[in-house]
Amino acid sequence: MQKILIRASGILLLIIVVTGLYTAVMTAIGQTFMPVQANGSLITRNKKVVTGSTKIARPLSDDKDLWGRAMTITTDKTGVLQAGASNISPNDKTYQKHLKSLRDEILKRNPASSSSVPEELLTTSGSGVDPDISLSAAIWQVPRIAKARGLNKSSVLKVIHAQSSPTLDKILGEQTVNVLLVNQALNKLKD
């Protein structure tokens, strides 16, 4: 019995050391070399008020804002926000009705843009809270944003291009923009 307790204690100690040590080392590395990312990539106003994160989108519907992807955020009985894929089939009639009404609403609010709405403004990402959209989807929204903010289109385009992320050798992937960073830069134009 004593051998079993010694072995069990040894295994418990090993697990505590390995998991505790691993966590401590990873936290130290993260805080040393990537403190912003390790703390959630938070954006603050006046270094006090957290206004968002560059890694998690938030729902936007104001005409003056750049809109991100459609989101699947729900609230449970306790008021906790939950996000994730809906797992609804693209052939589902309810989903098709939802897409049509969303497309109609987006076109109504973007009358100066071309008639084909970028798919990412209609569909969700796997997480449901993707913070980035393609550069082309951002540019598609320029007429609405410029009109709502009282800016010329070239000013809005300049902000969007300044916030775009480069692709690897212009071969892999598509240029994207972070919706929160673009909206913050647009807000600074009025200041």
Image: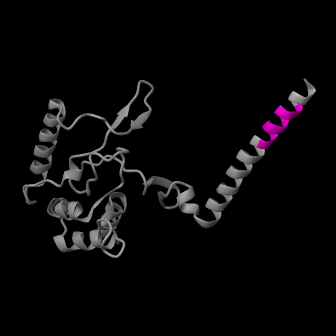
The one of 29 and 191 positioned closer to us in this rendering: 29
Q: Is residue 128 above or below residue 115?
A: above
What is the magenta range? Answer: 6-14
Q: Position of residue 74 (x, y in %)?
A: 35, 33
Q: Is residue 103 left or right of residue 163?
A: left
Q: What secondary structure is the stretch in magenta mostly built from? A: helix
In the image, residue 10 lies in the stretch drawn in magenta: yes
Q: Residue at x 69, y 51 (%)?
A: 22
In the image, residue 117 lies in the stretch drawn in magenta: no
Q: Residue furthest bottom?
A: 169
Q: Is residue 43 left or right of residue 175?
A: right
The one of 90 and 160 positioned closer to us in this rendering: 90
Q: Is residue 50 left or right of residue 69?
A: right
| Residue 177 visible | yes
Q: Position of residue 17 (x, y in %)?
A: 77, 46
Q: Residue at x 41, y 35 (%)?
A: 81
Q: Residue furthest right?
A: 2
Q: Is residue 94 above or below residue 18?
A: above
| Residue 152 visible | no
Q: Is residue 100 left or right of residue 164?
A: left
